[in-house]
Image (cartoon, coloured by chain):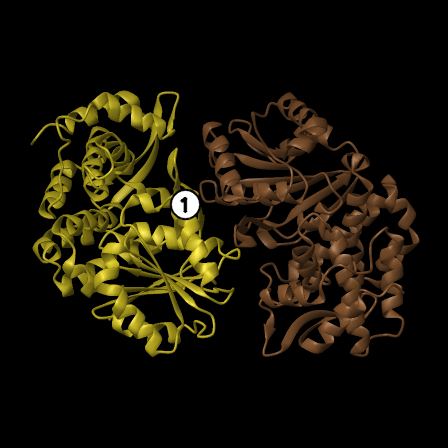
Chain colours: A yellow, B brown
Amino acid sequence: MRTVNVQLGERSYPIYIGEGLLQQAGSYLEKHQLSKQSPLLIVTDEKVADPYLGILEQSLTASGFKVVTAIVGSGETSKSLSVFEAVMTKAIEGGLDRKSAVIALGGGVVGDLAGFVAGTYMRGIRFVQMPTTVLAHDSSVGGKVAINHPLAKNMIGVFHQPELVLYDLSTLKTLPAREVYAGLAEMVKHGLIWDREFAYWCLEHAEELKSVDMQAMGYGLEKGCSIKAAVVSKDERENDLRAILNLGHTIGHAIEAVAGYGEIIHGEAISIGMVGSALIGEALGAEPGLVDTTREMLQSLGLPTVLPEHLSVDRIMTAMMHDKKFLEGQMTFVVPLEIGKVEINRNVDYDLVRRTVELLKKEV
Amino acid sequence: MRTVNVQLGERSYPIYIGEGLLQQAGSYLEKHQLSKQSPLLIVTDEKVADPYLGILEQSLTASGFKVVTAIVGSGETSKSLSVFEAVMTKAIEGGLDRKSAVIALGGGVVGDLAGFVAGTYMRGIRFVQMPTTVLAHDSSVGGKVAINHPLAKNMIGVFHQPELVLYDLSTLKTLPAREVYAGLAEMVKHGLIWDREFAYWCLEHAEELKSVDMQAMGYGLEKGCSIKAAVVSKDERENDLRAILNLGHTIGHAIEAVAGYGEIIHGEAISIGMVGSALIGEALGAEPGLVDTTREMLQSLGLPTVLPEHLSVDRIMTAMMHDKKFLEGQMTFVVPLEIGKVEINRNVDYDLVRRTVELLKKEV
């Protein structure tokens, strides 16, 4: 069992990473002194509920906890105000009080939705994350929770840190390969922004990671969470430093928006976006070979590095403009200097970004 | 001009109280370094908009601020998820960003709604309160903001402190008398829980307060805000001490619920509730004459002290049970010991509460 401590003063919390942790959920929640009088609300989605909800409920009730459940549809559409209201109804009808906690059992969508419920029910109650995807190692650190407004993603949210994160590696074994690889994009991103050695470790252990080897995956998630925790500890509310976590995300979000959500999934889009960032970095004088190494790392993890031909460069540029980070022809980007080191550059030229997006269509 | 400083560490903020402050809003916002690049969203209701929105907008635009407005219906129904979503839409369409602020121009409903928008838009942006009722002196201190769920009031919310509160006394001159008196209930409550001298001051200056004399009202609001600020500073997130602010509210909420919201307004209900608390206090050995003095103070401020005959004691008791503070026949109450001093009593007997509610029907 591995533990990462996220240091945030009185809001600090541990991330427990290991196999079979869902079966032991009851004792972990006991250890963290969650109330047995006040009901717990488990929020999960229909895909996760089938294999794992029973295991979790059994462990919790065996330890004497009272449990209420809310099962939502899987996918981004559950981050809506109407699903939020429905989960709130479950919480009220289930009798949750100020000493209750909300448990997110699932991936990023469930974590975001359940976290926003926990952050706003009676002005905030306790929150526990139990991620079941590789990608969720990223969202389980940092306390950013949100739902979508019809006009914009993640527009309605709060910062709400969990009491603990229980990361049961066993749940990752049944993930589709494509989702595993997409999650590895965020893992290697943590190496690319902060830890050269870890980025190369991901490359060297790519096959083990892709096949969800418990040892490699455990270490990779531990490192990924640790790096994110280090960044977040220094900048909890995203004033400046925390922005480096967005490496590849400006181009990536635009690709997702233009391709239509789901066509290219988040991890794939930011993989292509990180190649774009590397191209911008090299154009601005980063270490030689940066682009090739970045591509090699991403490809080894089963990730795409080329922008599909049918996606219009114009539309991607327009989507980026809507991101509102352009100011007078200049754009803020996370730009790599070398593998493991980036800087925030607020003066990236529009034309350079456009040329970069064009270059992303070229197979190398 | 009077200033109350609410001490909450890095979330501290001032409350400015005086006449004609709306006309000077632009310079106050400048002084607090709100952004002139990022639009401000003014949330107000249809009743307040007519006399005051123009004055505020003019002051802000004259100082170079960009302004977007959202006018909601007046009354509790605007604290719904659908109105919340509509205000969020205004914010997004108006181009609010992380450096924007939301301004609440109005009473408690507008403050609660706008505060929850500010607390959740892009995970929290700045918030400015401009109260236009006497009652809002209470809600403008403490950072509790919330909207209603169809099943329960104030169930969805956060703690979100304002940057500043601008309390323009001139807006109180046009309030209906009944609303002024209801607001005075919360004012004298602050004396009853914390400051004997101030409670007696309210009694002595009742006529000036009722007629909205600027001098008396300014002092009363300053004291009321100061006392609430002192309590909140010691217990920002309502762990224990802060509960004393609920004097009269347990019975009061039940009266509101049974009478139907609007029939007996909040300040009136807690006035009757505070007489109830005094009766419980005397039964448990508080200073002699406590009930008579409490009644005299409330009556002098134009407030009811007798429960209307048609309201069923059974239904009031049931409504209190739903408040979920009963535990095994015992109830938690804020109980007066003397004028200006209360305690939290977690063992108030059910039968004593019932007898008290019955007694509240008796004219004295």
Asked where in the image residue B170 lies, by quadrant, the reply is top right
Count of marks, rendered view: 1
- Graded by Cα atoms within 10 Å as few (under 14), some (14 to 19) or many (20 or more), the crowding at tag 1 reads few
Q: Nearer the viewer, residue A13 or A231?
A: A13
Query: Can you say whether A320 is above or below B104 in the image?
Result: above
Residue A232 in the image, given as x and y percentages of width and height: 38, 52
Residue at 85 percent of width and 41 percent of height? B212
Q: Is residue A32 visible?
A: yes
Residue at 20 percent of width and 27 percent of height? A357
Q: Is residue B64 left or right of residue B256?
A: left
**Subunit of label 1:** A
Residue farthest along the front direction in this orientation: B310
Q: Is residue A233 visible?
A: no
Residue A254 in the image, given as x and y percentages of width and height: 27, 32
Residue B131 in the image, given as x and y percentages of width and height: 70, 40
Q: Secondary structure at mark 1?
A: helix
Q: Is residue B155 left or right of residue B167?
A: left
Question: Which residue, given by chain and number where applicable, does mark 1 sit on?
Answer: A82
Query: Can you say whether A281 is above or below B6 in the image?
Result: above
Q: Nearer the viewer, residue B205 or A218?
A: B205
Q: The residue under label 1 is which amino acid type?
A: Ser
Residue at 7 percent of width and 55 percent of height? A207
The N terminus of chain B sits in image quarter: top right
Q: Nearer the viewer, residue B132 or B256?
A: B256
The C terminus of chain B sits in image quarter: bottom right
Q: Is residue A274 left or right of residue B294?
A: left
